[in-house]
Amino acid sequence: MEKGEINFFSENDFDLLNEDKYRMWIENSIESENKYVGDISFIFCDDEYLHKINMEYLSHDTYTDIISFDNTVGNTLQGDIFISTERVAENADAFNVNFDEELKRVLIHGILHFCGFNDKTEREKELMRRKEEEKIKLFHVEQ
């Protein structure tokens, strides 16, 4: 099976440093769930950009940190993940963590959705948080 690509794009002035480290970490996280890497795009943007997407595609008049469009086929993960870096910064402050930690949580949150994890019920949220923590730890192991 041909391996897909993980790409990072920015619709604002955010610049992800060490893209290759993030790419490797995300690939390892996907493989740790016995899934395959398809074409996955992360699009960094501001609150207004993501709010517009939320309204247009999901009819939600709310601000959010992430919206993922899952095009996974079988066990090959693919899709687009939009992330508001403004919201990530606000959440980092609110949760008293640094920006990079919160960004990792949000990045992997989108991937976990593609893996089939949800966060609608309390039980699902709990599992999602545990999985996020587990994958964030992998980032440090790989360095």
Image (cartoon, helix red, strand yellow):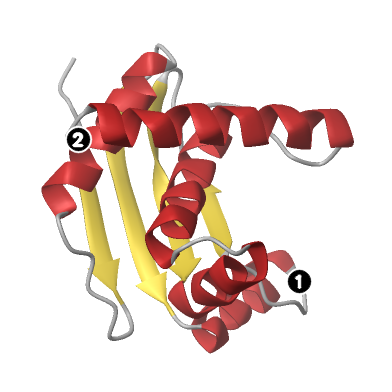
Amino acid found under the numbered disc labelled 1: Ser
Q: SS of the residue at dot 1?
A: loop
| Crowding near the residue tagged with mark 1, few <14, some 14–19, many ≥20 C-alpha atoms within 10 Å | few
- The quarter holding residue 30 reads top left
Say above or below: 122 vs 6: above
Upstream in the sequence, badge 2 or badge 1? Answer: 2
125 vs 59, nearest the viewer: 125
Pointer 1: what residue? 59
In the image, what residue type sits under mark 2? Answer: Met
- Relative horizontal placement of residue 128, taking residue 132 as reference (left or right): right
**Residue ID at (31%, 36%):** 139
In this rendering, the answer to whether 61 lies above or below 39 is below
Distance from the alpha carbon under mark 2 to that under mark 1: 34 Å
Expressed as whole percent of the image width and height from the top left, the position of residue 67 reads 57, 59
In the image, taking residue 103 as reference, residue 1 lies left or right, namely left
Image coordinates for residue 140, horizontal then vertical, percent: 29, 35
Which numbered disc covers residue 24? Answer: 2
The residue located at (24%, 59%) in the rendering is 8
Q: Position of residue 78 (x, y in %)?
A: 38, 38
Q: Which quarter of the rendering shows the C terminus?
A: top left
Please state the horizontal and vertical placement of residue 36, each as a whole percent of the image.
32, 21
Residue at image coords 65%, 33%: 128
Residue at 32 percent of width and 45 percent of height: 40
Is 98 left or right of 130, judged from the image as shown? Answer: left
